Amino acid sequence: HDPNIVIFGTTIGPPEDSEAPGYQRGGGRYRWQFPPKMRIVSGDLRTLDGTDKGLTTIAGDGTAYVAEGSISPDGRYLMYTSFETGQGDIYVKELATGKVTPLIQIPGYDGGPFFSADGKRITYRSDRHNNNLLQIFASDLEIDKEGTITGVRREHQLTDDSNVNWCPFWHPDGTHLVYATSAVSHRNYEVFIVDAAVDNSATPPRSRYGTAQRRVTHGPGADVLPVFNHDGSEMMWTCKRGAAETSQLWVAQFVSDLSSPSLGKDK
């Protein structure tokens, strides 16, 4: 919880040219490498100088791709994706003890995981059918009486379509997720929001996972990688609007009435 400490995935040095890119779609428009040297490191902004000096490896040993990390709300766990089994699986590592617990070990590339604000659920995207079409999932964590994460106890699938759906992120209210999708076009990704909770007011309780999908961004360039600030009043995302079509960070005020059938357009 120190604002001066950053975590990120890196190979430390450049990846080898012989390491072929992994996932791709539509003739190679979307492709990236999974170098085995990829690992998750931490560093102190007060001392980092742009080199690998001062970086501390917190997950990965250079033998398998380890990246896509996020920290639990209490700072106790690092969650990440690893290719140590030959496919993308999701793990948590207790930072104080170093204990690693597998969470998602199902065929297909599961990655990009984030904790919910209360630390009791996770969201991620998966290529379960090995068809280069990513879908959004959420799972309830199995947590013992000491607060230790021991696994997952129930998984919810939020999308099941012919689109590429990825980079999900929880709204702080814990009942919605935003994510980027090719639903509009594979050449124009947009951010959508979807319900992600169980309605306990209904009898019997009714799942709202995957319901009320609504479009959030409306722009000519790819809008991806959405995240919220602590209270959900603002959303930040990466956008390729403009003549140069370069990826830039955008921030906008987020409509707070999530019960509205239309969220309007981002400004």
Image: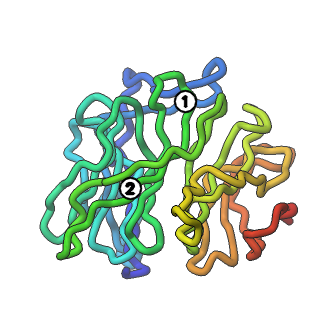
Which structural element holds mark 1? loop
Asked if the residues shown at circle 1 and circle 2 are in contact, with their CB atoms under 8 angstroms apart, the answer is: no
Which corner quadrant holds the N terminus?
A: bottom left
Of residues 47 and 94, which is closer to you in this image?
Answer: 94
**Circle 1 residue:** 31
Disc 1 to disc 2, C-alpha distance: 19 Å
The amino acid pointed to by label 1 is: Arg
**Circle 2 residue:** 69
Task: Bin the neighbour count of mark 2 within 10 Å (Cα to Cα): few under 14, some 14-19, many 20 and up.
Answer: many
73 to the left or right of 36:
right
Of residues 133 and 196, which is closer to you in this image?
Answer: 196
Residue 228 place in picture, x, y as percent: 61, 69
Task: Bin the neighbour count of mark 1 within 10 Å (Cα to Cα): few under 14, some 14-19, many 20 and up.
Answer: some
Against 72, residue 208 (above or below) is above
Against 14, residue 3 (above or below) is below
Which corner quadrant holds the C terminus?
A: bottom right
Q: Residue at x 28, y 66 (%)?
A: 77
Residue 147 place in picture, x, y as percent: 23, 74
The amino acid pointed to by label 2 is: Gly
